[in-house]
Amino acid sequence: MAVCAACDSEQEIATSKFCSKCGAEIPAVDSLRSAFKTAFYVHATLFVLTALMLDGGRSHQFCLIAMIGYWLAVLLLFMRRRKAPTRSDFLFIRYSVVPLWIAAPYIAEIVYRYIGESTRPGIERFF
């Protein structure tokens, strides 16, 4: 069962992708599944490629930070629009980890200016 975002009526997705009351399109579960499948492939590719870089693990750390930020953003997205994701939501789920990965070093530079870069690991830097 899916809920139409326009009229809040429950519809059976197997019968139609359109609401029988108002005619609005109901996003299919398959498109959400394919979006997460594409996101998994993009994440796996970035994870492996950054792990193989010989830069002391710096790019891999940025990749992990981008992935954590991505999953927090997806969690927020589903808390807000669980029943009726839009096309831009599907696009965000599929490919947004790449721009986050590109932006992570620049965001890290700002954070390091605030807390200071140190040799201490993890949360110990704040104390």
Image: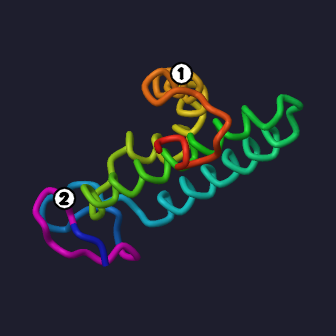
Boundaries of the magenta span: 4-15
Between tags 2 and 1, which lies in front?
1
Quadrant in which the N terminus is drawn? bottom left
Q: Which residue is mark 2?
A: 5
The image shows residue 7 at horizontal and vertical percentages of 10, 62
Mark before the other along the chain sequence, 2 or 1 = 2
The image shows residue 16 at horizontal and vertical percentages of 34, 68
Q: Which residue appears at 56% of the width and 30% of the height? A: 104
Camera-side residue of 14 and 105: 105
Q: Which residue appears at 56% of the width and 57% of the height? A: 36
* Residue lying at the far front of the rendered structure: 127
Q: Is residue 55 above or below residue 26?
A: above
Q: Helix, strand or loop at disc 1?
A: helix
Q: Which residue is mark 1?
A: 109
Number of callouts in the render?
A: 2
Left or right: where 46 falls relative to 76: right
Q: Is residue 66 above or below residue 44?
A: above
